[in-house]
Image: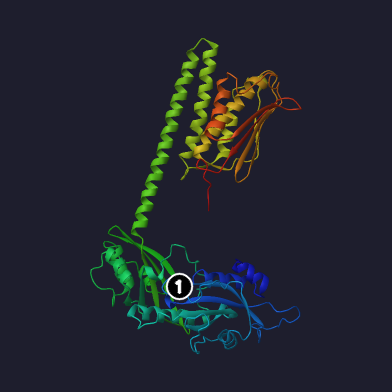
Amino acid sequence: MPTLPDLVRRQTDLDQRDLEWLHALVSDWQLLADLSFADLVLWVPQRREEGEAEAEWPPRTVDGWICVAQMRPTTGPTAYPDDLVGRAVRTGKRGLIDVAWRERRIVREGDPEWGSGIPVREESIPILARYGSSTTKMLGVVQRSTNLSSARTPSRLELTYLQSASDLAQMISEGRFPVPGAEANLIRSPRVGDGLLRVDRAGRVVYASPNALSAYRRLGLATDLVGVHLGETTAVLAETNAPIDESFIGMLSGKNHREVEVEAHGAFVQLRMIPLIVSGEQIGSIALIRDVTELRWRDRELMTKDATIREIHHRVKNNLQTVAALLRLQARRLRIPEGRAALEEAVRRVGSIAIVHETLSHTPDELIDFDEIADRVIAMSGEVMALETRVHPKRAGSFGVLPAAIASPIAMILTELLQNALQHGLAVRGGTLEVLVSRTEERLHVEVRDDGVGLPPDFDPESADSLGIQIVRALTEGELGGSLAFGNRETGGASVVLDLPLLGPRAPQRTG
């Protein structure tokens, strides 16, 4: 399905500033759809043929309309089961849209339509963008379509919804909604069905939906909400032992378009204030209210769990470093060279795992930027060479973000391959040692290569008795499900190529 930016840029004469205004409108027009119990369809004038553009805007006549966005209500039945986005209509096919555009007013006259087999009441709301204090521009028309098949006598709640929707529609036609300069509506912002308050210009509640009243009951309110001053009452509930914050009271009186979260008695309530300004005068405001107590407690539990996991990684790192220190002390006491070398190799293996846990102790999730770990492992491996044959390994390419489940095995594999190259390929005359990395969404390709003496002609990794080679094969093929290839380079030296899968239960991908 084509997107709003695609349709606006390819089929209309609107500019980037106009597109941003429409973006702000459609990011928040679920509110209008739910209050209206109606579908919303956004129509904008199609681009004129080359040479026909008029100097003035809006143009006196429109040849056709293109639907660039659509929204269905969550509070009632839809009038349009099919998607209309991308559909074009000629002038005259939807008369109320033409009138709203030409006369710059909300058009409600007309009998219900029965084109789809159900009665639908159509209204058209012109969209006026207000740029600064004196610049305005007509951008399009919102068609509001109400399915009348389940029409009945409205309740007090429904009447309040409809009145609020009427006020918001008037604000759209006057360029006051979306609110210029206000932050975009967040995904977790309260919705109409979560709870609604209607507040007068003095800040007093004139209507409270049952859900809104229940939310305030959780904050500790023992009386009715209707008739009380919303700002003062909320401030008292939120801070029973503190002086009342005048700015807090003013915000909850509906003077500004703001969101706030209130905590009291272990409960959390989110409020969104929307001033209602019609004909340049504030007539009151609506407050959307959502009880987010369970969400906040869950967030706190997750934060506590994350902190616990990070502390565990920190302690594991400390324990591994202690083990490495003990092995190092033991190695210094040994007089047998083979035993000392084996303990030193164990120290390096433990150290590579400790580096991973140290990184995990500083991250909020189980995903790691592995480049830093790789560089530390590479640097640690290069330090074991004698000064006269000192090799400085280097990395080319990026490992990127890896899950902890495969970061530890890869760190161990890298340690073993680097150590093997330094001890057997470059120990005598030195040389260069490189780690080449490339990555796609599904695979990680790593090559460790040197320009040393190369592998023996009869080398077979499957029958090699080297503990390091056995560790590399077990981790690569058995644990990570990858492939491993040893070989000699044509220019001299050895090369080990790893091909590892990144998708699957062991390698979740970071999103967002």
Which of the two residues, 452 or 42, is positioned nearer the viewer here? 42
Count of all numbered marks drawn on residues in the image: 1
Quadrant of the frame with the N terminus: bottom right
The residue positioned farthest toward the front in the image shown: 117
Please provide percent x and percent y for residue 393: 65, 30
In-image side of 35 versus 142 (left or right): left
Q: Secondary structure at mark 1?
A: loop
Q: Which image quarter: residue 213? A: bottom left
The residue sitting at 30% across, 71% down in the picture is 210
Please provide percent x and percent y for residue 182: 50, 69
Please provide percent x and percent y for residue 51: 76, 80
Q: What amino acid is at disc 1?
A: Pro
In-image side of 6 versus 114 (left or right): right
**Residue carrying label 1:** 73
Mark 1: few, some, or many residues within 10 Å (few <14, many ≥20)? many
The residue sitting at 55% across, 21% down in the picture is 467
* Residue 18 vertical placement versus 318 (above, below): below
In-image side of 385 versus 151 (left or right): right
